[in-house]
Image (cartoon, rainbow, N blue to C red):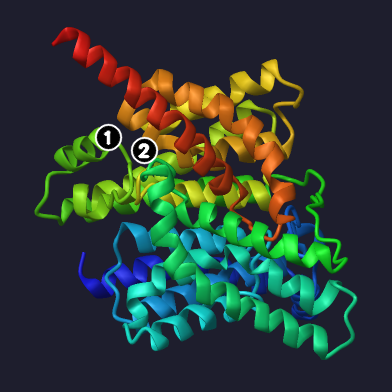
Amino acid sequence: MTSKKAYLFLAAFPALLLVIGLLIEPIGATGAGVIRIITARSLLLTDYLAIGGVGATLVNAGVCGLVSVGLVKLNGVQVNGPFIAAVYTVIGFAFFGKNVYNIWPVFAGVFLYSRIQKTPFRNSLLVALFGTTLAPLVSYFSFVSGLPQPGGILLGLGFGVVVGFVLPPLASHMLRFHDGYNIYNIGFTGGIVGSFFVAIFRSFDFAIAPEILLVERAGLFFELLFLGIFTALIVVGLIVARSSEHSLADGAKRILASTGRLVSDFVHIGGYGATIINMGVMGLLGSAFVFLLGGYFNGPVIGGLLTVVGFAAFGKHPVNCIPVLIGVVLASFLKIWDASTTVVVIAGLFGTTLAPIAGQYGPVAGVFAGFFHLSIVMNVGMLHGGINLYNNGFAGGFVASFLAPIIDAFKKSESEKKA
């Protein structure tokens, strides 16, 4: 793919969501819904479908996605695996937590950091896009903290800039903690930053805590829409592969052989064609997982699916993800949580952040990773109060940092015995 076609591919999906959102409901209702989304609490788990409705949520997701693609294009960044993952993650979380208002201060904070450090903004753009995991902090202080206006809005904007500013130096440092076995590194970083700030806020009597607000089970609209999109990705991948110099079969083999450990850019490893096909396949696999557990497509579940699809360009494939999904399902059967609930469904989808454990150490290790992940993710949200949208990335960092050294130690012991 040429650079121009790669940008068009990346922009096509959010543009489609925007158009559908503008057409599906009267423009007045959609506009009012967008306002409700902007002023919503936005902490985990705030389903924008329940807040603003279908049209407004699709418009919000489309605009957030196009803004992200615009920043990629404006900074002359190549459309590779990490940036595909970043854009799709922003779009996914624009269904529950990120909106056209609260993402901008985080961008501004990362931009300010790059200016002070005298480095190009493009070098930190990936952190800026993923760093919108902390965007709910902006919404909380702006609209629901109870502070008088415009003071609340100014404080929310200011805190957004501050967290954006501190993310780049912390992100590279936190990578060492889990050694690349947690794909959502910014999720772990965001959890640390969020926990730090929330502890301070709570000492000033700000009640920041996660709550669950989900849309009730609706019709088949989103199921049909996204199953169609995931299937279309496979078709697009096949078309791209036909005009590529690289063999599709070889590209697919290289992707499936990858451990997924950071940094695994599947565009570089297997080419655009194989990568886009992997994105479609992972979307269908994630959807099958949702259906098998008896879940349904609400904002967080759609966000989980789109994040899986995005990271299918940056570390995830069926071989290293299925063991983690199995581990989460087994855990839900043996523990206190109902497998069909949204919190368990998204723990499985987002829990594939631990796919490198399975990729590096084998499927049994992946099952254990998924099994432990469900317990950890259900308990760490209170630390950051829901202002870190990538709660599974936060939990995944702890699971990876716990399991990887233990597995390495036993492997080292076995090698020494054989020697």
Disc 1 marks which amino acid? Leu
Residue topped by disc 1? 256
The residue at the point 74 percent across, 70 percent down is 25
Q: Is residue 285 visible?
A: no
| Residue 209 vs residue 352, the one in the foreground | 209
The residue at the point 34 percent across, 23 percent down is 409
Residue topped by disc 2? 317
Query: Looking at this rendering, what residue extends furthest in the left direction?
Result: 245
Q: Is residue 14 left or right of residue 290?
A: left
Q: Which mark sits nearer the N-terminus, 1 or 2?
A: 1
| Residue 326 vs residue 128, the one in the foreground | 128
Quadrant of the snapshot with the C terminus: top left
Mark 1–mark 2 CB contact (< 8 Å): yes
The residue at the point 30 percent across, 75 percent down is 77
Name which quarter of the figure residue 317 lies in.
top left
| Residue 16 vs residue 70, the one in the foreground | 70
Tell me the CA gap for discs 1 and 2: 6 Å
Q: Is residue 230 left or right of residue 267?
A: right
Q: Position of residue 48 (x, y in %)?
A: 74, 61
Q: Secondary structure at mark 2?
A: loop
Q: Secondary structure at mark 1?
A: helix
Q: Position of residue 258 (x, y in %)?
A: 26, 38
Q: Is residue 208 left or right of residue 340?
A: right
Q: Position of residue 81 (x, y in %)?
A: 32, 57
Disc 2 marks which amino acid? His
Name which quarter of the figure residue 277 lies in.
top left
Name which quarter of the figure residue 160 lies in.
bottom right
